[in-house]
Image (spheres, helix red, strand yellow):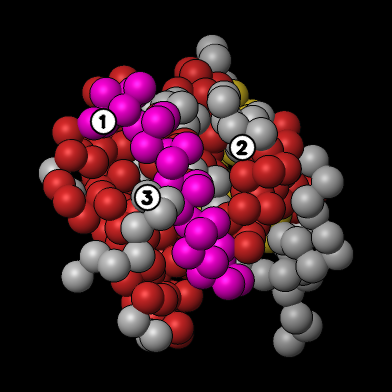
Amino acid sequence: MAPKPLLTYEAFLATAATDPDVVGLVLKGSHAHDGMATEHSDHDVYVILKDGADTDLISLNGHRSAELDLVVTTLDAFRQLDGYERYALARARVVLDRMDGEITEIVSAKGQLGSDEAFREAADWLDAYANSLYRSVKNARDGHLLAARLDAADSIRFLLEFLFALNNRPRPYNKYLEWELERFPLPEWETTALLNTIGRITETADTNLQRQLFTQVETAAREAGHGPTLDAWTEDLLLMRPGFDNQP
């Protein structure tokens, strides 16, 4: 039996566009980020079907190849996508929208966190950042250098979540962090300086640099109404700020 021909992105789009059960096609991943695709990049596509659809395309859900990754879902399920997929959708491209713009509106909305949601998430991420920062500085002081570097790396992950939540945005995946900040900078943060600082902290766990960065973060956090989250750390805040090395 002859092998099935490779399912290419272009061939799949041509087929899906003629299926009346398909109400939307959304491209995410490297090919949705200008300049990020390489010869190794596949095409990641959401195939959105009308609710109750009965089409052969359902069998392609989960299809993965070097050329094409497919997620076949219903319109209602697509509306509910959240969590880790938020950033994927934030910069996704709508290839087909048969819902009079609804698919486009859903994709656009996923790129923005609601005010209440963003505030709650920012508070949680700020607390996680402070926790890892505190542990990193304390471990460095006590000579546990590997632990200090690991905690510093954790702290940067939480910090980025916090900073993007302050801006009502989902945090980009690591692969797209520079791409995102170069095109859509965070207000009040100079992109090159921020990237250089978090890069050095991740590599070295430099405690002076961590504390200097915390000074900026603390100012931004308090201006955004997150003072109570920081104040809950009481005297432990001293270890996170510049100039204090002898906390127990």
- Most foreground residue, 191 or 47: 191
Residue 207 shows up from this direction = yes
Q: Is mark 2 in CB contact (under 8 Å) with mark 1?
A: no
Quadrant for the C terminus, please. Answer: bottom left
> How much space separates mark 3 and mark 2, taking CA atoms?
39 Å
Q: Answer with left or right where residue 7 lies relative to residue 124.
A: right
Count of number-bearing discs: 3
Q: Which sits earlier in the primary sequence, circle 3 or circle 2?
A: 2
* Left or right: 230 in relation to 39: left
> Residue at (83%, 46%) from the top-left corner?
35
Kindly report which numbered mark, 1 or 3, lies closer to the viewer in this rendering. 3
Other residues around mark 2 within 10 Å, as few (<14) / some (14–19) / many (≥20):
many
- Which of the labelled discs sits on residue 92, or is there none? 2
> Residue visible at 86% across and 64% down?
39
Residue stretch in magenta: 201-227
| 143 up-or-down from 113: above or below | below
- Dominant secondary structure, magenta: helix
Count neighbours of disc 3 (C-alpha within 10 A) and say few if under 14, some if 14 to 19, many if 20 or more: some
**Residue 151 location, x and y as percent?**
39, 70
Mark pair 1, 3: CA separation: 17 Å
Residue at image mark 3? 241
Q: Identity of the amino acid at label 2?
A: Ala
Considering only order in the chain, which callout, 3 or 1, is on the residue closer to the N terminus? 1
Specify few, some or many for label 1: CA neighbours under 10 Å numbering under 14, 14-19, or 20 or more: some
Instruction: Assess whether mark 3 and mark 1 are in contact (beta carbons under 8 angstroms).
Output: no
Q: Is 228 in front, or is 124?
A: 228
Element type at marker 1? Answer: loop
Going by the numbered disc 1, the residue's amino acid type is His
Measuring 75% from the left and 81% from the top, which residue is drawn there? 3
Helix, strand or loop at mark 3: loop
